[in-house]
Amino acid sequence: MIQAVNLSTELAGIHLSNPVIAASGTFGYGEEFECFADLRRIGGISVKGTSARPIAGNLPPRLFPTPSGMLNSIGLENVGVDVFIRDKMPFLRNAGCAVLVNVFGFDEDEYAEVIDKLNTCDGIAAYELNISCPNTKHGGMVFGQSPELTRHLISIVKTRSRRPLIVKLSPNVTDISELARAAEDAGADALTVANTFLAMAIDTDTFKPRIHTVTGGLSGPAIRPITLRMVYQCTRAVKIPVIGLGGITKAEDAIEYFLAGASAVQVGTANFYDPRAPLHVLDGLQKFLKKRGFSSIRDLVGKMQQ
């Protein structure tokens, strides 16, 4: 039997039993995976993005497999904050792991409305702010592509939030370090790096897009080298913790992110074909630490040799 090592970590004031988190949009509300995986062993679950009102999502086709990854354009489908609090949180309170609620809106007022309602709900460890949405009050510019909009939005949300605020950055920018600094300046307690990459695919038989909305978000192992670079840049640009996300399917992938400076990781696309993916990453991480003689996950963080 593998001897346990200390995998616990503190992230923005949140205690996690281990640094492996199921990523938003890939693990539902946790209850969908209960029959496949022991949720008490996962460090945390970032639930589906939650909005002020229910969203039906985009028309199909909205998923398409790509080499070493997938395109998705789900359209932020979710039950809305009121139903989430009433119907989803009772299960999540007893799941045995940290609950991160991913929050989004299409203007500042919608973000604030969701945060205000979640503030009254017990059992939430932190908010993860998705800033990859178009700001309808500012001509459709995506919040997370502008340092000014990023700073303004986070400042508003931070003043209302009663819990730690994790900001999920968009990779579709020229310099992600600039956005990371803007988020930190505005009061973000941690960062998730990063969301999906804007991409597309075309059917050469029908000449039609593979995704109904033409473009979608690219995720999976294909993006890992790029997001790894972004994590490395962000951990050197800010003092707040960074969560690495992008293409993690096994422990070695997660270890790369830790070596680059990430304090925790999220497992995303792998959950679609392996509902136990976070646990497999966790088990492999524990074996790696023991084999190398490390006593804590902190022994890996930022230890890339140059």
Image (tube, rainbow, N blue to C red):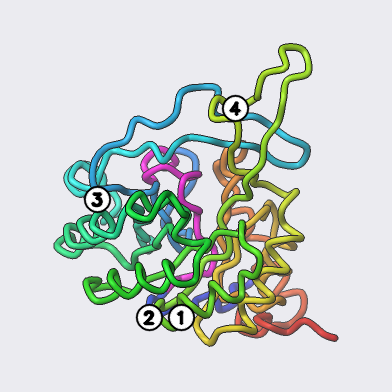
Q: Considering only order in the chain, which callout, 4 or 1, is on the residue closer to the N terminus?
A: 1
- Mark in the foreground, 4 or 3: 4
Residue shown at the point (40%, 38%) measured from the top left: 32
Q: Name the residue beneath numbered marker 3.
A: 89
Q: What is the chief secondary structure element of the magenta stretch?
A: loop
**Magenta stretch in the rendered image:** 16-33
Mark 4 or 3, nearer chain start: 3
Q: CA distance from mark 1 to mark 4?
A: 35 Å
Looking at this view, is 176 or 147 the one in front? Answer: 147
- Judged by depth in the image, the label closer to the viewer, 2 or 3, is 2
Q: Residue, x 24% and y 50% (percent of image)?
A: 89
Label whose residue precedes the other's in the sequence (2 or 3): 3
Which mark is in front, 3 or 1? 1
Q: On residue 187, which mark appears?
A: 2
Q: Nearer the viewer, residue 172 or 193?
A: 172
Left or right of 173 in this view: 293: right
* N-terminal-most mark, 3 or 1: 3
Secondary structure of the residue carrying numbered label 4: loop
Residue located beneath label 1 in the image = 184
Answer with mark 2 or mark 4, whichever residue precedes in sequence.
2
Element at badge 3?
helix
Q: Amino acid at mark 3?
A: Met
Say whether residue 82 is magenta: no
What is the spatial separation of the Cα atoms under label 2 and label 4, in whole angstroms?
36 Å
Could you say where residue 131 lies in the image, as x and y percent from the top left?
44, 59
The x, y position of residue 34, in whole percent, is: 41, 42
